Image (tube, rainbow, N blue to C red):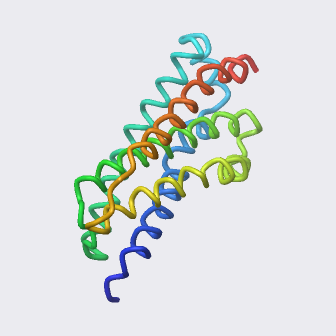
Amino acid sequence: MDEPEAKVWNGLFWVIQLFICINAVAKSFLQESRGRMLYFYSLASPVSFVLAKLIFNSLLMLLMSLLSLFLFIIFLGNPLDKATQFIGLTLLGGWSLSLVFSFLAAIAAKAQQNAAIMAVLGFPIIIPQLLLLMRLSNAAFAPLLTISSTTVLLLITMDILVIMLSVILFPFLWKD
């Protein structure tokens, strides 16, 4: 198989990142039994619990993002002109995906642990982030394009919004 062109490589990378995140991060809440959640309920506050889960899932997804980027470069070649910028975007994108799917996994875990709910809720929410990430990462493939700082700030703002929503809304899920 030949090396795909840059746009195909970019799109394929972010779609794979999406599925890696769904499989890796979703299990953090969905595999917890009711007894274990009761134990956590007696041990920690809801805000510290959800922040710990967000941090753990973020670190896990950062590691998975770097690993998948490494494997992509090995198996599909390296069409990147600005590799350091793309690595930064990969880390930011992995963090964004992990935050959204961690919060959605918490919601799905309270709905009789149905992973399909997470996917149904997640795709309308994650599509704008994926489009932003693809638009930003296209600049890493072209030598003349530059990465827009306003788009990066928009992505970071969306991440902060997800964190704030998690901190505000998770205590209501926690009480159930």
Residue at the image position 53 percent from the left and 20 percent from the top: 49
Residue 117 on image: x %, y %: 73, 48
Camera-nearest residue between 106 and 77: 77
Q: Is residue 134 left or right of residue 88?
A: right
- Of 44 and 127, which appears nearest the observer? 127
Query: How many dots with numbers?
Result: 0
Q: Give the farthest residue toward the bottom.
A: 1
Q: Quadrant of the C terminus?
A: top right
Q: Is residue 122 above or below residue 51?
A: below
Residue at the image position 29 percent from the left and 75 percent from the top: 75
**Image coordinates for residue 170, horizontal then vertical, percent:** 65, 23
Quick check: 171 left or right of 155? right
Q: Is residue 84 above or below residue 61?
A: below
The answer to which of 173 and 127 lies nearer the viewer is: 127
Q: Is residue 132 left or right of residue 46?
A: left
**In the rendered image, the vertical position of residue 121 relative to residue 109, given as above or below:** below
Q: Residue at x 42, y 65 (%)?
A: 13
Name the spot of residue 130 as percent of width and height, x first.
53, 55
Q: State the image quarter where residue 68 is shown.
A: bottom left
Q: Quadrant of residue 111?
A: top right
Name the outermost residue toward the front: 144
Q: Quadrant of the N terminus?
A: bottom left
